[in-house]
Amino acid sequence: MVDTAANTTFDSKGEIMTMRTTVAAGIATAALGDEVTLCGWVANRRDHGGIVFLDLRDASGLAQIVADPSLSGCEMVHDVRAEYVLQVTGVVSPRPEGTVNPDLPTGAVEVVAQTVVVLNRSEPLPFPLDETHHGVDESLRLKYRYLDLRKPRMNRNLRVRAETVRAIRQAFDAQGFVEVETPTLTLSTPEGARDYLVPSRTQPGSFYALPQSPQLFKQLLMVGGLDRYYQIAHCWRDEDLRADRQPEFTQLDMEASFVDDVDIRDMVTIAIQRVVGTVTGRDIGEIPSMTWAEAMARFGSDKPDTRFGCELNDVSTVFATSEFRAFAGNAVVAMCVPGAGDASRSRLDAWTDRSKALGAAGLVWMRVTETGVESPVAKFCTDVEIAALIETLGAAPGDLLLMVADARALTCQTVLGQLRLEVGAERGLRPTGLGDQLNFLWVTDFPLFEPESQGDPVPAHHPFTMPHPDDVEFLSTDPLRVRSLAYDLVLNGIELGSGSVRIHRPDLQAEIFSVLGIDEERAEERFGFLLQAFRYGAPPHAGFAFGVDRLVMILCDEQSLREVIAFPKTQSGADPLTGAPGPVDASQLVDLGLRISVPKSPGS
């Protein structure tokens, strides 16, 4: 058994047996002449005319070891290779003049070895353990993840993750929350993403589902009078993967009774402030907020990246009487890209094609000059319209104006919002590093429903979200007009998490189900245990959840969740380390009453 805090091991009788007296970083503060014992891996080996220099690495950093193989106890250093595990005893000494490494915390000192013991050997590595991943296939890194984790960067990422979780717990503990673990084998409720299903051996033909979130259980905890709950919850979603998505993920999940949406946002803000302060030392201050409608109007996104400008403007009034057919009678949304007037025609054509792929009929562009604008459509616009457009957008010579027109303003906003991100990144306006600047933002008052081509609206958040009190009257007449008491936390254009005030009244919940086309029988089948609980005095309550993986990814300035998860899956959902998913023994299928029928591939 190893106690890393004390740097000791225990023998079979439980007596302490010291293996090291300090960690590598500890030699930076040790007194010159102190005798120390270190343990770690050989990161580098250099033979300088008989004297061997070793960089010994452990979880704390690097220590330079100087070993003379002619000395008794150091004879084996000639045979030492990369990633051998060593125990080194020696004396802390100053590095000779001219060899100090100011970029290394231990760069002013070294350990002159008295004895070097090989604790274990290593075979040649499948890839180098430097900080770059260039030329190393990611699946190879994941297959040998235990080697990949030896890299200081990966080691640091997992430590930041641990600090993040610790700060979250401290913040919610301090606010009177109780940590409760909810079940991970539960009933499938096919809403949103697909569930991961677990067959029951004792009840053949029946299945558990791994939870996509603890949503229903945390609401039941509020009915149970717990008042304030939180959990570092492990969740699963069977959905297509990408850089910021994994099939299994970790989230902070919380719920509180007798609170409103502002209370919840304040509670979460306190936790975020503590996390960022603990991990980075920065004070993010209060987190600003804007409504969903404002976010769409200004940024064309419900998760806006506010680190750069190029904000959208509705210029429909500018072209209200325009004779240009594409603008006439349509909503027109525009943005100004500073300094992009030098964009080539091929780039403008590419952005036009991109706009069409996003759902627009096309893209109108105008280069701003000293005398007006240059554009294929300039001849269709009046001088008054062009002057008003330039003034509205605050454009200057050398800038580029991009416009989208459509019968629906939301279409214009969505298309131009995505183009804003892509053009902004291409032109160097949008920061590339996620962690350099931390722009948190609360987005509030989301629509309660989204249109569905099949007929009935679908919940924009989930079917237990409280409608905005000012819009309840529209539930039966114009449901798509109804706002919700839902809110998202956004960081640098990435959705960290979402939450809402919950419906706690059975009559209002039944009305929402009716709008969604869920009849009483179907509602009882899917959510009966929750609806029954609401009949016994459910308190007003609200909650929130944010992705721990995503937050740590940004704090570590990484571009992929896989860099901050110890043992992640690939984008295909595979685990190269263990070979999962894989086949199981036929006897296991028999126990479960299952037979495998592999779907035929198309055309077979």
Image: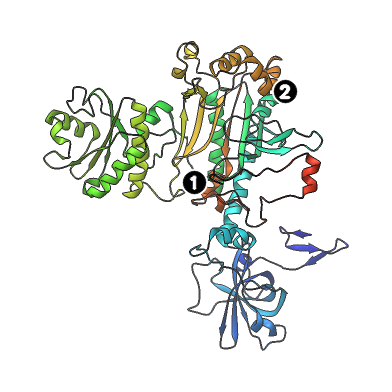
Mark-to-mark CA distance, 2 and 1: 38 Å
Q: Is residue 372 above or below residue 565?
A: above
Q: Position of residue 544 (x, y in %)?
A: 58, 31
As drawn, which residue projects farthest toward the front? Answer: 604
Q: Which of 264/374 is in front? A: 374
**Along the polypeptide, which appears first: circle 2 or circle 1?**
2
Q: Position of residue 448 (x, y in %)?
A: 50, 22
Label placed on residue 224: 2
Q: Secondary structure at mark 1?
A: loop
- Can the viewer see residue 343 in this picture? no
As drawn, which residue projects farthest toward the right? Answer: 13
Q: Is residue 368 above or below residue 519?
A: below
Q: Is residue 521 above or below residue 60?
A: above
Which residue is found at the position 71% from the left and 15% from the top?
A: 536
Q: Residues within 10 Å of mark 1 (few under 14, many from 20)?
A: few
Label placed on residue 282: 1
Which residue is found at the position 18% from the left and 28% from the top?
A: 324
Q: Position of residue 369 (x, y in %)?
A: 15, 42
Q: Quadrant of residue 170?
A: top right
Q: Is residue 565 above or below residue 114?
A: above
Q: Relative to 458, is 595 on the left or the right?
A: right
Nearer the observer, disc 2 or disc 1? 2
Q: Which of 338/89 is in front? A: 338
Residue flagged by tag 1: what amino acid is it? Arg
Q: Position of residue 465 (x, y in %)?
A: 56, 22
Do the residues under discs 2 and 1 have CB atoms within 8 angstroms? no
Q: Which of 339/247 is in front? A: 247
Residue flagged by tag 2: what amino acid is it? Gly
- Quarter of the picture containing the N terminus is bottom right
Q: Relative to 110, is 595 on the left or the right?
A: right
